[in-house]
Image (cartoon, coloured by chain):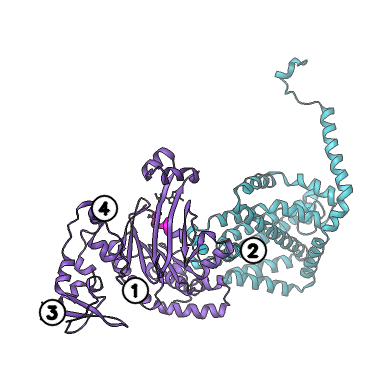
Chain colours: A cyan, B purple
Amino acid sequence: MADPNWLIDFPAIDDATLRAINRAIDDAYLGFTRTFGAAIEDAFLPLLRLMVWVEQMLLGAPWWLVIAVIAGLAWAASRRPALVGLVVGSFLFIGIMGMWEDTMRTMAMIAVCTLMAVTAGIPIGVLMSRSDRLKGAVVPVLDVMQTMPSFVYLIPVVMLLGLGKVPGVLAVVIYAIPPVIRLTDLGIRLVNEEVLEATDAFGASPWQRLWGVQVPLALPNIMAGINQTIMMALSMVVVASMIGVKGLGQPVLRAVTNQYFAMGVLNGLAVVLLAIIFDRLTQSYGRRLQRYRDDA
Amino acid sequence: MTPESKIAIAGLYKIFGPDPAAALPLVRDRGIGKTELLEQHGHVLGLDNISMTVRQGDVHVVMGLSGSGKSTLIRHLNRLIEPTAGSIHVDGTDIMDLSPRALRHFRRHRASMVFQRFALHPHRTVLGNVAYGLRVQGVKRATAEARARGWIERVGLSGFEDRFPTALSGGMQQRVGLARALATDSDILLMDEAFSALDPLIRTDMQGVLLALQAELRKTIVFITHDLDEALRLGDRIAILRDGAVIQEGTTPEIVMRPADAYIADFVKDINRARVLRVKAVMTSDRAGARGPAVDAQTTLEEALTAFHDDPSGRRPVSREGEGIVGSVGLPEILRAIERPDISGSDARVTPQARAAG
Ligand SMILES: Nc1ncnc2c1ncn2[C@@H]1O[C@H](COP(=O)(O)OP(=O)(O)O)[C@@H](O)[C@H]1O
Ligand SMILES: [Mg+2]
């Protein structure tokens, strides 16, 4: 070493080299987005359509119908009048405080993100439960997805797809998908060996065994995963608003930059109410799925 | 092999461990035993050269202490466990040759199983559990459930169709397990300590249920147990397993009257022979000179004694349900059978006889 100070100062590569490396990576990625950006954007067109469709449906329907449908879902999931009361009360409050439209946009966003996370997450979790090698490969990726500061992976998504709904959904799904995957894998691995042996003894095919026994018995765990996924998606609402996703996140962002305290609290409260409703709803449903355990 | 042979097991070995194929010659050719194989070579000898024939329509009991390989053996019969070597012919087909598809067909239609800890589907109702085998076969829901209801009634669970298993007692859960296995109409029933987890009274009850069903259905049943009384009550033939090897096989009376070695003699020494042995085991088919009321072939010797109160020197005709008079029995044979045999080492070795006792 020519420089004797390397024991004191960390022998980092010099700034110029670092800049060159960063530039090289950025250029390569930029090249990739230029070449494939349009194609990828086209590939996500159905997602955009779905997103727009759900949003239009929620915004277009009369408010009382929306409340009635969600209250009906709450009843179906829990059979508990208290939860139905909470749902109706919360939405009336949101409506009266003028946050109806933003809330519907956020709900549309959460619904689509959850749908995406579940449709991708359950199959991944199922595959993971069947192979320890796959699990060994997927778990570190999930760890990175969950611990990487969420702003960081907004950057490549935005570079690739620009601002708007689709990159928003992608960012949210990446952030929120790990719990569904993890708990699907866990739930299937926890299914009783003897029950599976009996299933095999009756000649069930792998498909019959998966959908008739493993997934149903893992469902309480899978529901817990979906619940966490929804919560994480909601927590991304504000971050997603920074890349142009409309909804409750935008007023919060505006409130932060302009120091509108009341506005921030109100919209924040609406997010909290949504979180509580979705949480109670999915949990009650998860419990009802297990009612065979305490059939007396 | 007799024509009535249903399942023929030949040279079956199962070795558990990292390299069973390498350990096989040690056992097969050099005769290394279970303990040495484990200590010197780190493999577990599960089954050691099992050859055994199960006859059509018999209840074939496999008995042995815990760890003797009973569960391992019965799981080979529907290939829940793959052997290290050997063959199992069912109706002449080696089930080791079955493709995955053919094996599924075999499990769906030919052999069904009842488990020690029931292994019911907790998320299905009683009806759903009993119909499961049929649903797997591809039978339509309505048909499957209608047939399942019939079996639920047969095992005495009417009214519980919509309950979940957790709501039922152990005895009731095993009735579900039995109905589930019977519902597929398979000709072979595999029962791995099916009643061992039940209380003694319930267990006796279930044995009665099984015997009653079997009298009518005449399935080929392989029944695993570690309980001698159960083995004697249910078994037409009994195979005794120790350290993965069959050490004696024969009809129930053969085992009781001529135990092959001290180990088995020890097993059977305390049983009440008058209650365990039945007339069918000591009767002769010659019915000349028999008079008085007929004795049923299924009667225990203890009960049969009462038929000789008035006329100790005469012979009584023996009847069998559905067949009428099939032979005769006299007091001397009965008394000889009840006497405890003296077991003197190796000359007591039994060669299984072709004569069917039941
Ligand atoms: N998967 C396995 N791996 C290693 N050893 C096993 C395995 N299954 C069974 N064994 C061993 O094989 C022997 C027979 O077991 P098992 O068939 O369960 O006995 P039983 O049903 O008569 O109690 C035991 O020594 C047991 O420890
Ligand atoms: Mg066992």
Part of the protein shown in magenta? B69-73
Q: Which residue is mark 4?
A: B263
Q: In terms of secondary structure, what is the magenta stretch mainly?
A: helix
Judging from the image, what secondary structure is the residue with disc 2 in? helix
Q: Quadrant of residue B176?
A: bottom left
Q: How many marks?
A: 4
Rounded to the nearest angstrom, the CA distance separating label 3 from label 4 is: 38 Å
Crowd rating for badge 4 (residues with CA inside 10 Å; few <14, some 14–19, many 20+): few
Q: Residue at x 62, y 45 (%)?
A: A136
Is label 1 or label 2 in front? 1
Label 1 sits on residue? B211
Left/right placement of residue A87 relative to residue B177 reads: right
Q: Quadrant of residue B313?
A: bottom left
Q: CA distance from mark 4 to mark 2?
A: 68 Å
Query: Looking at mark 2, is its residue's CB closer than 8 Å to ligand 1?
Result: no
Circle 2: residue type: Ile
Pointer 2 residue: A277
Residue B314 badge: 3
Q: Which mark is residue B304?
A: none
Which mark is nearer the camera, 3 or 1?
Answer: 3
Residue A269 magenta: no
**Pointer 3 and pointer 1 on the same chain:** yes
Kindly state the secondary structure of the residue where label 1 is placed: helix
* Relative horizontal placement of residue A295, taking residue A85 as reference (left or right): left
The residue nearer to you, when weighing A39 against B46, is B46
Residue B19, percent from left and from top: 50, 43
**Residue shown at 59% from the left, 64% from the top:** B101
Chain under numbered label 1: B
Q: Amino acid at mark 4?
A: Tyr
Q: Position of residue A175 (x, y in %)?
A: 71, 51
Camera-nearest label, 4 or 2: 4
